[in-house]
Amino acid sequence: MTKIDYDAIAKLSLAGELIDRTTAKSILTAPDLVLLEQLAAAYKVRYHYWSNRVRLHFLLNAQSGLCPEDCNYCSQSKISTAEIEKYPLIAQARIVQAADKAADLKAGTFCMAISGRSPSESVFNNVLDAFKAVKEKHDLKICACLGLLNESQTQRLAEVGVDRVNHNLNTSENHHENICSTHTFRDRVATIKNVQKAGITTCSGGILGMNETDEDIIDLAYSLRELDVTSVPVNFLIPIAGTPLSDVNQLNPRRCLRILSLFRFILPKQEIRIAGGREVHLRSLQVMGLYPANSIFVGDYLTTTGQSEDADLAMIRDGGFVLENPDGSILNVEDNIILTR
């Protein structure tokens, strides 16, 4: 087997060059023996853009279940029989309380998601009012995850100060029809482009471990690069009972680390976030994921729980990383001293 020069891959990535498909596939199929070489090279790229800083994001599921879509991975979809809480949009006061917790945890971004294909006009108006209330109280970046959005909706989000909109591609265009039939890959791309037209930064990533091939993983990363998205959440499938993918388990910690490294090489300057499934699939190697990635969710996910905030902070501290505060200053979690850049 030809030895791969990971330092050369890092230099290519830092130069802004796209690594070719053969090289990308070799990263995903490399033996465990060279995993540390991969991570060291990915960290060179990550460090160039992000130093040893880690961004925290806090996620609120403000409307749960009741979704007419048939996404096979999702416990909130119409075809899911998963035992989850189902509720309409929660009251504005509860949304602001969640933002209070995000601020207390030093999360730089308050992410709010609602289930459904696209918000109704009444729900959308309530969401806009809630975002305005959060902005009035906190200096938090707001990321909205509201489903498919048209140009008018994204413009209205911009007008109330929403900083970012999340809409994941989820998987490759080729594999999408195996995951969802009620909307297309192009529908998702259209929403991302509408967000960009409104001048809002884009958050888009995927879910890995859904029976996709290595080629699908590479295609997804290439698509995100082509769209020039700003933030990339990398989710690892949590096989939830009651969903069509409940018996799928293709991942282990080393596979996840290879995927994260590949994403860093293809998306060198993007914020890459280890999102859902971090605790389930990286397990004892979670901290190693911060060598290619530079942000995490702190707290719980949409319908599954994360590890404790204290465990997250200990992981960051023990790995020699520091937190980036909402104002751009650095919180050294070793001694809780606020440092300036």
Image (tube, rainbow, N blue to C red):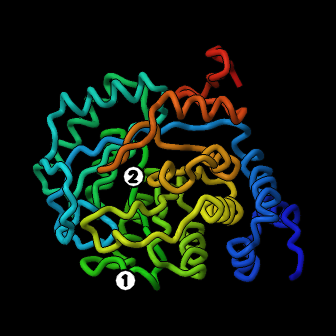
Residue 191 in sight here: yes
Q: Quadrant of residue 19?
A: bottom right
Which residue is under mark 1?
178
Residue drawn at x 75%, y 45% is: 47
- Residue 227 horizontal/vertical position (percent): 53, 67
SS under mark 1: loop
What secondary structure is marked by label 2? strand
Q: Quick one: 108 or 273, which is closer to the camera? A: 273
Please name the amino acid that badge 2 sits on: Val
The quadrant of the rendering that contains the N terminus is: bottom right
Question: Which residue lies under the disc numbered 2?
Answer: 165
Q: Position of residue 88 (x, y in %)?
A: 12, 48
Tell me: residue 176, above or below residue 45: below
The answer to whether residue 21 is above or below residue 208 is: below
- The nearer-to-camera label among 1 and 2 is 1
Residue at x 52%, y 56% (from the top left corner): 281
The amino acid sitting under disc 1 is: Asn
